[in-house]
């Protein structure tokens, strides 16, 4: 662009000298034309800017890790002037860290027409990918002048986490939700409010479980198997508070969220209805979601991902428990990055739960081996970044 300005400046000077030296009508016409060209170029791009519309969007608001998702930039030129080039600078980043990547797009836009370009992005880690058009310039056909389109253009895509296979057991304790009517479809239990199955009497069966009316009709003892409640007070709490800012920040958050998903899937596979609790920056409060099936889990994970702000603001987890002094749980699993010892000590001493687990994401196997196990009422499970399945082998929930 600077080169074209220099060329036209030289041409104008040459034509002016030519006009001074040779008083011909042709010299005057040539000078007028050379001066008029940049003026026309300036006016054309200036007027085109005033009738320019720009749209920026992602057709998919949710995507999987390591898979491409499309983003479209569309420029509509309602003017009668051709745009020689539109130059857009695209920036994108994951809200879990502040590393901004950028690239440029170049495209012409015809008069009374629109031009669209679609590009593909992907992410190795889950989170919110913020995509913005940091700048958009339009040029006249000769590339002498450019104008900036002053518009804030931004979109975002939630990159969803993946689940991992875990090993462990799900214990059914005496604590149940008395208002619930959700029972196992595959295993009997001890809740007399609903009958799970009827079967023949076996030695050792309790007499109070004999179905006397049906037994008298069949001339043999028929026993009632009671139902097993699956809606027990169990909570998976994920602490999204950032305790460090380093190259590990993004992998740590990715492992945190995927650990939550893996534990929740494991509980659903074992017919355990449970709650997921987290701090939502968008509503500035802690949020609890009941997980009854894979659909509710997918919705909760998307809600969790979208609840994260650029500032990564998060209230201290202790506030969640302080707001619920009468909390009584069958199991509590606290998922966190390496925190200070105060919150773990608080949970160990003050939270009423039959089973307490602290799943702590650490940076390396050495950190996992060195992590203290100083809380008698709580089991500590260090999870090395990216090694969820191998780290969680025998958890009890």
Image (cartoon, rainbow, N blue to C red):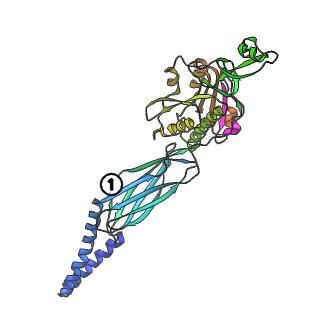
- For residue 301: magenta? no
Q: Nearer the viewer, residue 14 or 262?
A: 262
Secondary structure of the residue carrying tag 1 is loop
273 over 49 or under it: above or below: above
Q: Is residue 175 left or right of residue 159?
A: right
**Label 1 crowding class (10 Å Cα cut-off): few <14, some 14-19, many 20+?**
few
169 over 12 or under it: above or below: above
Which quadrant of the figure contains the C terminus? top right
**Span of residues in magenta:** 378-393
Judged from this view, the residue extending furthest toward the top is: 208
**The image quarter in which residue 378 lies:** top right
- For residue 391: magenta? yes
Residue 85 % position (x, y): 38, 66
Q: Is residue 371 visible?
A: no
At a point 66% along the width and 18% down the height, the residue shown is 191
Judged from this view, the residue extending furthest toward the right is: 203
Q: Is residue 137 visible?
A: yes
Q: Is residue 123 left or right of residue 22?
A: right
At a point 56% along the width and 25% down the height, the residue shown is 343
Q: Is residue 2 left or right of residue 269?
A: left
**The image quarter in which residue 283 lies:** top left
Residue 141 % position (x, y): 34, 71
Which quadrant of the figure contains the N terminus? bottom left
Q: Residue beneath label 1, please?
A: 150
Residue 96 % position (x, y): 52, 42
Residue 327 % position (x, y): 55, 19
202 over 111 or under it: above or below: above
């Amino acid at each position: 662009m600077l080169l074209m300005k220099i060329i036209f400046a030289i041409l104008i000077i040459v034509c002016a000298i030519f006009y001074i030296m040779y008083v011909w009508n042709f010299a005057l016409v040539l000078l007028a034309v050379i001066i008029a060209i940049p003026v026309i170029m300036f006016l054309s791009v200036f007027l085109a800017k005033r009738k320019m519309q720009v749209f920026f969007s992602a057709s998919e608001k949710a995507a999987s890790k390591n898979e491409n998702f499309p983003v479209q930039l569309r420029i509509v030129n309602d003017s009668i002037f051709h745009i020689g080039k539109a130059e857009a600078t695209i920036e994108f980043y994951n809200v879990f860290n502040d590393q901004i990547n950028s690239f440029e797009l170049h495209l012409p836009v015809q008069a009374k027409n629109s031009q669209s370009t679609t590009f593909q992005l992907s992410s190795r880690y889950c989170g919110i990918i913020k995509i913005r058009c940091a700048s958009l310039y339009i040029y006249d056909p000769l590339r002498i002048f450019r104008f900036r389109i002053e518009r804030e253009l931004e979109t975002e895509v939630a990159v969803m986490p993946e689940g991992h296979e875990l090993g462990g057991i799900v214990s059914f304790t005496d604590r149940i939700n008395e208002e619930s009517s959700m029972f196992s479809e595959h295993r009997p239990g001890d809740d007399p409010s609903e009958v799970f199955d009827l079967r023949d009497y076996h030695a050792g069966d309790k007499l109070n479980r004999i179905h006397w009316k049906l037994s008298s009709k069949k001339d043999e003892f028929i026993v009632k198997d009671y139902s097993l409640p699956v809606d027990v007070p169990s909570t998976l709490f994920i602490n999204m508070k950032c305790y460090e800012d380093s190259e590990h920040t993004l992998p740590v958050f990715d492992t945190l969220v995927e650990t939550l998903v893996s534990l929740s899937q494991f509980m659903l596979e074992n017919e355990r209805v449970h709650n997921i609790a987290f701090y939502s920056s968008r509503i500035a409060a802690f949020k609890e979601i009941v997980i009854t099936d894979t659909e509710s889990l997918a919705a909760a994970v998307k809600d969790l991902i979208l609840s994260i702000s650029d500032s990564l603001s998060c209230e201290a987890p202790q506030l969640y428990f302080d707001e619920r002094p009468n909390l009584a749980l069958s199991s509590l699993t606290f998922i966190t990055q390496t925190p200070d010892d105060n919150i773990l000590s608080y949970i160990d001493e003050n939270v009423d739960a039959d089973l307490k687990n602290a799943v702590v994401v650490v940076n390396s196997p050495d950190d996992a081996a060195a992590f203290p196990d100083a809380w008698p009422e709580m089991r500590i499970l260090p999870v090395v970044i990216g090694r969820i399945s191998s780290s969680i082998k025998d958890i009890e929930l």
